[in-house]
Image (tube, rainbow, N blue to C red):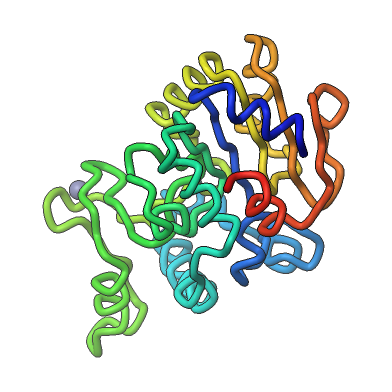
Amino acid sequence: MNDIKKWIAETNKIVIFTGAGISTESGIPDFRSPGGIWTKMQPIMFQDFLSSEASQIESWKRKFVIDKDMKVAKPNIGHIAISKLYSKNKISYILTQNIDNLHHDSGIPDNKIIELHGNSTYAKCLNCNKRYELSYIKEFLEKKDNNYSTAPKCIECNGIIKSATISFGQPMPIKEMQIAEKSSIECDLFIVIGSSLKVYPAAGLPILAKKNGAKLIIINRETTELDSISDRVLNKEIGVTLDKLFY
Ligand SMILES: [Zn+2]
C-alpha cells in the first residue's frame, strides 16, 4: 500500500481501468461471472439483433427486467474514492468496462469517462446516433396497439434503435478505443480495479501501458490474467481498499 501511495503522489497521469468488480459492491450483478446472467441465458448476438425484429423485441424485454437492478444502484465508496482522486487532478482518464453510469453518478465529468462497452442507461439509433431515453422505448413497446409486436425505429431516419451498450459481436467503439489506447500509452500509473482482464481487446490496455513504461497495479478480489506482469497486486475488497489508497 505504501509504495502505491508513493507512486500516486508522484504523478498526475494516472489511468484508472474498472470492471464489474467495483459495481458488485453497489448491488449490480456481474453478468459474466459463474451464476451471472450470461451463464443462464444465451446472449443475443449483434448480427441477430440487426437482422431480426423478433430479436430486437426480445432484447428490449430482457433489458427492462435486468434494469430493475441497475436503477436502484448508487455509487459505492470505491466510486467515491476514485472521484476524490480525480478532484485532486491525478487522473487523466477512467476507462471502464461497466455500463452502469456509476462513475458519472459519482460526479466525474462525462468526457473523462471512456465507456468501452457503452452505457445501458439510454439508447441510440444505430444509423444516425440520435439518443433516445429508455422511458420512450418502453412507452412505445407497451402502447396498447403495439404491445411488443413491433420494435421502435428512429423518428429521424427510420434506423434501428438499440441500447447504447456494446453487445456480443458488435465492434468496439472506435473513438473510445483510440482515447483508451492513447491514454494508456501516455500514463505513468495504470490501475486496474475489479476486472479479471479476460475480455479483449479492453484487457490489452494494461499490457500497452506497461510496455510503454507505466507502472501497473491490479486491485481485484480474485487473481487475474496479468498478475505476473504487474508491479503490485492487491487481492482485497475493492471499496475499502480504494478508500484507504485514494484519500
Ligand atoms: Zn436515426
Q: What percent of the width, then of the height, locates residue 226? A: 80, 30
Q: Residue at x 19, y 53 (%)?
A: 158
Residue displayed at 55% across by 14% down: 185
- The answer to whether 241 is drawn above or below residue 217 in the figure is below
User: Residue 117 at x, y = what percent?
Assistant: 51, 44
- Left or right: where 192 falls relative to 74: right
- Asked whether the viewer can see residue 46, the reply is no
Q: Residue at x 63, y 9 (%)?
A: 212
**In the rendered view, would you say 220 is above or below 185?**
below
Q: Is residue 11 visible?
A: yes
- In the picture as drawn, the residue positioned furthest to the bottom comes out as 144
Residue 145 placement, left or right of 40: left
Image coordinates of residue 193 in percent, x first then y, are 67, 44
Depth check, front residue: 203 or 40: 203
Q: Nearer the viewer, residue 126 or 186?
A: 186
Where is residue 64? Give x, y as percent: 45, 75
Quadrant into which the N terminus falls: top right
Q: Residue at x 82, y 34 (%)?
A: 225
Q: Quadrant of residue 120?
A: bottom left
